[in-house]
Every structure is written in structure tokens, then in C-alpha cells.
Image: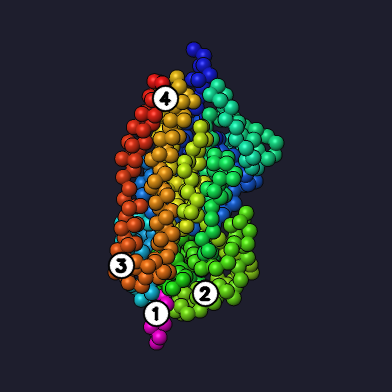
Amino acid sequence: MAIKTKAQQPLEVAVIGGGVVGLALVTGLLYRGVSVKVYEKSSSFRPVGAGIGFTPNAMRALGMLHPKALEAQQKVATANGDPDDPNDWIRYLDAYHHNSEEDEEVTIFKLYCGRRGFEGCVRADFMNELLKIIPDGIIEFGKSLENIIDRGDDEKVLMQFRDGTTAEADIVIGCDGIKSEVRKIILGKNHLAAEPSYNHQYALRGLVPMDKAIAALGEYKGRNRHMHLGPGSYVATVPVALGKAINLVAFIQDPDEWPDTTQLTAPADKEKVLQAFNDFGRPVRNLIRTVVDTSPRLDKWGIFDCVDRQSPTFTKGRVCIAGDAAHAASPHHGAGAGMGMEDNLVLAVLLAEVATSEEGQDNRAASIRAALTAYSNVRLERTQWVAESSRTIGELLEWRYPPTMSDWEKCEAELTWRSHKIWHHDQEAMLRTAQADYERILHRTIDT
């Protein structure tokens, strides 16, 4: 048997961060035979956040990434209404100009998602299902990244951790979220885009047992996705946990600065929370009151994004970023998971080409740089548009977007075209573009 040269050794990928995007990327790489290891800073997996939404494009990308990853999502996803006859609409309600006698909300418009086209699940449940696909020994815990050193084409990339240990890989991919250390290393810690910015908005989020949700909202609204709109605030309610709970996200405007930008959460003032929804109808008031009264400690989540501090690139050398680490957006589109899955799909396909092709074997460092550059090129514009659009949708849903304000027909039209641009993205064309760009960049590098 011939001994492989250094350039012919199996491609080794390191993923920094074991969240949803990082774990899904691992499944896509393993599915294509690419060696990968995850370095997670926490000591074990803990549920961060409550629910997570999967738009139509997210589910398509997930299925292309690894069929079992899509099966994992489908296993824990909750359909609107009856799972056997799902109600595939998002309903937008006027929760403010309510009927004074019945105190009921009025449907002002709705958005069709396609059959089981936009479903929620509990983040921890989905992660647990992904972990069943990943073999033991892939994930190392307690690894907080300190630095990455690209030591040149003849050496692997060196990762240094705060516990004093090191590791090596051919490629390092940062899936370490909105406060990404890898992004800071790529751009430089003093670069404007190294840190996200606060949107002067925070959210209450959490799981509300279905019986309590139904008591506040009624049976139909409890078991189906709704957006309860009003001036300056709104509430999203989505059934999750296979119908046992709803995921609630209540958005509140905040004129103040965020108290500690190193933390994404802070204690919430319960009276201010209640006051923000004081003029809403009874269903929203009751739901918010339920959350406030049943929470010994009520936390608020700061809404940060990268819109005002967009990264000029997602890669440097043999290091790149994906998901929120690359293009964090506010959650108003519910498209964060979809953008991360599309990132993963491009990376998995291109890195499989690097790992298996003759050119990738013979020109490893150059092929890695070409692949990551092609990835950045194909993902930059779309993901940054989604982040910008998500901020716009937040303004629209709070009746403060000047072109629409409270004109429901204009709101519906604006929301529809923006959502469809996200949901109906041609992912096969995206991959063809990325692969062609990879070949072009690599050949230009080799020929010079």
C-alpha cells in the first residue's frame, strides 16, 4: 500500500462552536466523508434560547446537507394545528385596535408558507436529534478559543485555547455565534464589524405550557402560529414541543443603551414589560401577565445584529465563519436557521471537492483558500440582505416602517415579497455558482 504524502492526508476540518449551525455542518461534512472535529467552549450542551423556526429554504438546505438531519428536524417539528392536516398560514393580528366589547384580536392579513413550510421546534430537542447522527469523539467540551494562527501552506492551522491546550486542522470554521471570537480573529479585534450592534430593542422569550397559552389566547390561536401586532411592540406565538407548548417572543422598544454588551441577556423590569403591552387587547395582556407572574427571574434578550457593521468578507486564508458568526440578523424574519443551513450546504459541498478531487489533493492550501473565498462570495450579498430585511420587517410589524405604517395591504405585499425572496431561493443554482467560482479561483491561482 502506498504511503500518502502530507498533502494527501485526509482533510481535517475544525468547527468552533457546537450550536445548531455547527452541529448541522458536522453532519453534512461527515455525510460526504470529510473528517471533522468540534470545539465547544461550554462544559456540556445546555439549551440556549427556547424555540427555533425552520423556513422552507432551511428545510430544503437541511435535507441536501444530510437526509438524516432533515429527519431529525421533522421528528421534533410542530405543525400548525393538526399535524395530519396542518394549517400552513401565518396569521397577523391587530392586537391593539381590539373590539371594545369582546376584546378580541382581528386578523388583518396572512401569509401562506406551503405545506408544513414554516415550523418551529425546541432548540434543545433538535440538537439532541442531531447528536444522534454524530459519532462519539467528534466533540470536545471546555474549549474556549483564544487565537488561531495560520502558519503557512506547509503547516496546519493552529488553534490555541484558554485552557492552555492547542489543536491543529487544515481548515477552521467559526460557528460560534453572534459574539464570535473567530470573526474577531479574521477581521481584527479593532475592526468595526468585529462586534454586533444593539438595535434598541429587546425580547422576552420562553416556552409557555399549551394549557396556559390556550387560557390566554384561546384554542385556535394557541395551536397555530400567530403574530400579534401593535405600535412599537409585537408578540410572536408558535406551537412547539409537538403541541405541548408555545414559543413566545415579545419584542419591546428600548431607548436606552444595552447595560453590558458582553452579555446578550439582562434582568428585565417586570413593570416596564407589562406597561409595554398595557394598551394591547386582553389576549396579549393575559399572555404577558402569565409569563411575568410565573417567572421568578425575568430575563430580556438584547436584539443585536450586524446590519450597521457588516463584515467585508467571511474568510481569511484557511479560516472562515458561518451562521450568526458571519451575518447575525434580528429574528423578525425567522430566517436565521435557514441562512446557517445554506452556509453549511455550500461549505460541505466545496470542502468535499477539496477533500476528494485530484486538484484538491495536489494543491491543498490553494484549494482550501479558493473554496472558502468562493463560499464567501456566494453567501455575502444574500445573507447581508436578509439581515437588513429582517430589521425592516421588525419595523413593519410594529407599524413604524414609513412606506407601510398601518396600511395592511401594503404591509402584506411588503412582507410577502421579502419572505418569498428568502424561502424560494434556488439552492442548486447557488451551489453551481459556488463550484464554478471555486474552479475559477483555483485555476487562476495554480496558473500564476
Q: Nearer the viewer, residue 403 or 105?
A: 403
Asked if residue 169 lies left or right of residue 61, the reply is right
> Circle 3 sits on which residue?
410
- The image quadrant that residue 263 belongs to is bottom right
Name the residue at 43% across, 63% down: 394
Disc assigned to residue 276: 2
Q: Measure how far apart labels 4 and 3 are at the Cα level.
A: 49 Å
Whichever of callouts 4 and 3 sits on the residue coming sooner in the sequence is 3
Q: Measure how far apart labels 2 and 3 are at the Cα level.
A: 25 Å
> Visible in this render: residue 101?
yes
> Circle 4 sits on which residue?
445
Badge 2 crowding class, 10 Å Cα cut-off, few under 14, some 14 to 19, many 20 or more, is some
Whichever of callouts 1 and 2 sits on the residue coming sooner in the sequence is 1
Whichever of callouts 2 and 3 sits on the residue coming sooner in the sequence is 2
Name the residue at 46% across, 71% down: 232
From the image, state whether disc 4 or disc 3 is nearer to you: 4
> Circle 1 sits on which residue?
97
**Residue 112, percent from left and from top:** 31, 61
